[in-house]
Image (cartoon, rainbow, N blue to C red):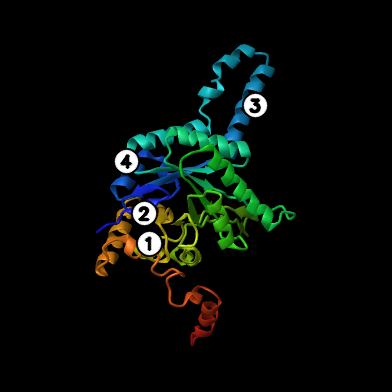
Amino acid sequence: MDLTTDYMGLRLRNPLIASASPLNSDIGKLRALEDYGAAAVVLPSIFEEQIVAERREFERRTEEVAASGFAEAQSYFPTYDSYGFEPERYLDIVRRAKEAVGIPVIASLNGITREGWTDYASALEQAGADAIELNIYFIPADLSMTGRDVEQRYLEILRLVKASVAIPVAAKIGPHFSAIGAMARALADEGANALVLFNRFYQPDIDIATLRLSMDLELSRPAEIRLPLLWIAILYGRVPAALAASTGVESADEVFKYLLAGADVVMTTSSLLRHGVSHMKTLLDGLWALLAARDIDSVEEVRGRMSQQRLRDPTAFERANYIQMLQGYRVPDAV
């Protein structure tokens, strides 16, 4: 059976990718993921805020030493180049990952300034990353900012990064644009080699016992597959960019559904955090079994089969389906 897949110019042995998570900063776990069948890995994001904070802390400490009157003590502090700020540590992970595994290594970047996006993207390319995933995590809390302003911010970031690197660039976006299809097309027109659907914007909860914000991380569940499934099915064959599914993957069933909708690759983090890196083999074996049971010889045979473009009734993904679902619901007798 042929599971090979093309993802933004990278030839993968199958469509399963271990997306960004703390697991992927450990070289041993990266090797294990490769052994268990991962076709590529996305490293944890490098965050510009962390880099800036570390630099400020370094400057504060050196200034305190100088103010104490013991200027010679400054010689005991490492220089900027040797201090090991977050970029250097992250770049070292990229280099070691490339040496340790034979599958593509995708770097994840989350910047806040023009210089941060471009400088770090260039550094990631030089460190050996096969591609870059732009983790554009942005909450437009400024009430004067319009939807168009938000869209332009995304497009400008992509434009800047594409101009600074030669390797493929994926844009990981959230589902909150007013016209996702038009935005997807605009990103593809600006050169996005892939769209990752969707970024999960982690929202706070309120702890009513302490009256404080709770920032606990909740892992995704299979029920969350429906929104990205919808948009992958709509976008398949209609945008010149690869499509990566990135939410709700718990079993091979979700992998199969995403491929049917039109995903080029399927990414998972939560299932690996929940079950361990060996779960990657469970997903791969399960996908193989689902295809074999239907006498399907390759993933290309199923990709996009259930997309809007290929359904006899394309309105099933639109308003007609919404009405049918509401009218078809049956209230339980116990209610």
Tell me which label, 4 or 1, sits earlier in the chain.
4
Badge 2 amino acid: Leu
Tell me which label, 3 or 4, sits earlier in the chain.
3
Secondary structure, mark 2, is strand
Q: Quadrant of residue 145?
A: bottom right
Secondary structure, mark 4, is loop
Q: Which residue is mark 2?
A: 16
Few, some or many C-alpha atoms within 10 Å of disc 3 (few <14, some 14-19, many ≥20)?
Answer: few
- In 3D space, how far apart are the residues under numbered discs 3 and 2 (Cα atoms)? 45 Å
Marks 4 & 2, CB-CB < 8 Å contact: no
| Coordinates of residue 83 in the picture (x, y in percent) | 52, 25
Q: Quadrant of residue 100?
A: top left
Q: Which residue is mark 1?
A: 255
Please indicate whether residue 1 sits to the left or right of residue 223 in the image. Answer: left
Q: Residue at x 44, y 33 (%)?
A: 127
Secondary structure, mark 3, is helix
Marks 2 & 1, CB-CB < 8 Å contact: yes
The mark lying in front, picked from 3 and 4, is 4
- In 3D space, how far apart are the residues under numbered discs 4 and 2 (Cα atoms)? 15 Å
Q: Which residue is mark 3?
A: 60
Tell me which label, 1 or 3, sits earlier in the chain.
3
Q: Can residue 335 be seen in the rendering of this structure? A: no
| Coordinates of residue 287 in the picture (x, y in percent) | 31, 61
Tell me which label, 4 or 2, sits earlier in the chain.
2
Q: Residue at x 28, y 65 (%)?
A: 291
Q: Which residue is mark 4?
A: 102
- In 3D space, how far apart are the residues under numbered discs 2 and 1 (Cα atoms)? 8 Å
Badge 4 amino acid: Gly
- In 3D space, how far apart are the residues under numbered discs 4 and 1 (Cα atoms)? 23 Å
Badge 3 amino acid: Arg
Please indicate whether residue 149 sits to the left or right of residue 327 in the image. Answer: right
